[in-house]
Image (cartoon, rainbow, N blue to C red):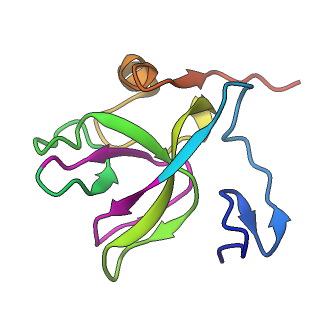
Amino acid sequence: MTSPINKPGVSADALVPDSLLAGDFDIVSGSVTLISGQNLARGSVLGIITASNKATLSLAASADGSQVPNCILADDVDASGGDAVAPIYKTGEFNEAALTIGTGHTAASIRETLRGNSIFLKSVMGA
């Protein structure tokens, strides 16, 4: 359920804390159109399909542009029934263990690409 104030990570008018955010770097959010046929969780690493400018889970073996990690999904989004507008993080510091990374990618393999977009992956250690 999306909050009336439409803030990522907020549902039913209450903050739902998780371990995705991992630092003080300014977060810039935005939105993309998530291509149909997907039901993705907050923290999914997305790539952009060049021909349609729509987002999908970034898979290393893709050859449509989406193989390049671009942004991080800010909320759970169900696009299984059709394209859906999805909130994203364009910049920030994120816990790499909390990400959903597509097949063929690892945190190590996407770190530098995301860093070019001011998305920084951190290994978060518990107290």
Q: Position of residue 91 (x, y in %)?
A: 54, 33
Outermost residue toward the bottom in this view: 81
**Which residue corresponds to the image point at 52% horizontal and 58% vertical from the top-left?**
41
Asked if the magenta segment contains residue 48, the reply would be: yes
Count the marks: how many?
Answer: 0
Decide: is 92 above or below 101.
above
**Which residue corresponds to the image point at 72% horizontal and 26% vertical from the top-left?**
23
Outermost residue toward the right in this view: 127
**Which residue corresponds to the image point at 31% horizontal and 79% vertical from the top-left?**
82
In the displayed structure, does residue 65 sit left or right of residue 78? left
The answer to which quarter of the image holds residue 83 is bottom left
Q: Where does the magenta region start and end?
A: 31-50
Asked if the magenta segment contains residue 82, the reply would be: no
Q: Position of residue 125 (x, y in %)?
A: 76, 22
Q: Position of residue 95 (x, y in %)?
A: 63, 31
Q: Position of residue 62 (x, y in %)?
A: 16, 43
Image quarter where the C terminus lies is: top right
**Which residue corresponds to the image point at 23% horizontal and 38% vertical from the top-left?**
67
In the displayed structure, does residue 4 sit left or right of residue 72? right
**Which one is in front, 123 or 26?**
26
